[in-house]
Image (cartoon, grey):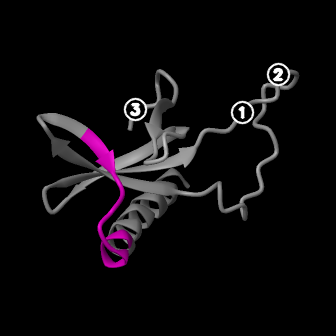
Amino acid sequence: MDDSFGPDFITVTDEEGNDFELEMVDSLEHNGITYYAMFPAVEEDEATGQPKDVDADDEEYGLVIMKAIQENGEELLSTLDSDEELDQVYELFMERFFQDEDEEA
């Protein structure tokens, strides 16, 4: 992804009507489906401009993987259908993340 203009943020609404802001990290296509890797948006400390403390073990913070689906001619984001699909796509993203990391070193 091109970060020359800064990160991409999207707001998703769950089934209960709660809005969540997510930061887009990467996307990939697998078996004709587009998947997106995102992290919950982290607020910055106004004084320092640095991200506020985030507990990486907090279940509210972590990698979120969603897929694009077509519904009534509109592209929507959806959760994955099974743990197997999630595991497979997660591994694909991890391979890409580590490959990028190795290339930068």
The numbered mark, 2 or 3, whose residue comes first in the sequence reads: 3
Vertical relation: 78 (above or below) 71: below
Q: Residue at x 65, y 55 (%)?
A: 60
Which one is in front in this view, the residue at disc 1 or the one at disc 3? 1
Circles 1, 3 touching at the beta carbon (< 8 Å): no
Residue in the foreground of this view, choosing between 77 and 47: 77
CA distance separating discs 1 and 3? 22 Å
Observer-side mark, 2 or 3, equals: 2
Residue under the point 13% across and 56% down: 32
Q: Secondary structure at mark 3?
A: loop
Q: Amino acid at mark 1?
A: Glu
List the residue tagged with mark 3.
2
Q: Is residue 55 left or right of residue 91?
A: right
86 or 3: nearer the viewer: 86
Q: Which residue is mark 1?
A: 43
Pinpoint residue 37: horizontal percent, then vertical percent: 43, 51
Residues rendered magenta in the picture: 76-86
Outermost right residue? 47
The residue tagged 2 is: 46
Local SS, label 2: loop
Residue 34, disc: none
Q: Nearer the viewer, residue 60 or 43?
A: 60
Q: Quadrant of residue 70?
A: top left
Q: Is residue 3 left or right of residue 41?
A: left
Q: CA distance from mark 2 to mark 3?
A: 26 Å
Q: Which of the pair 79/62 is nearer the observer? A: 79
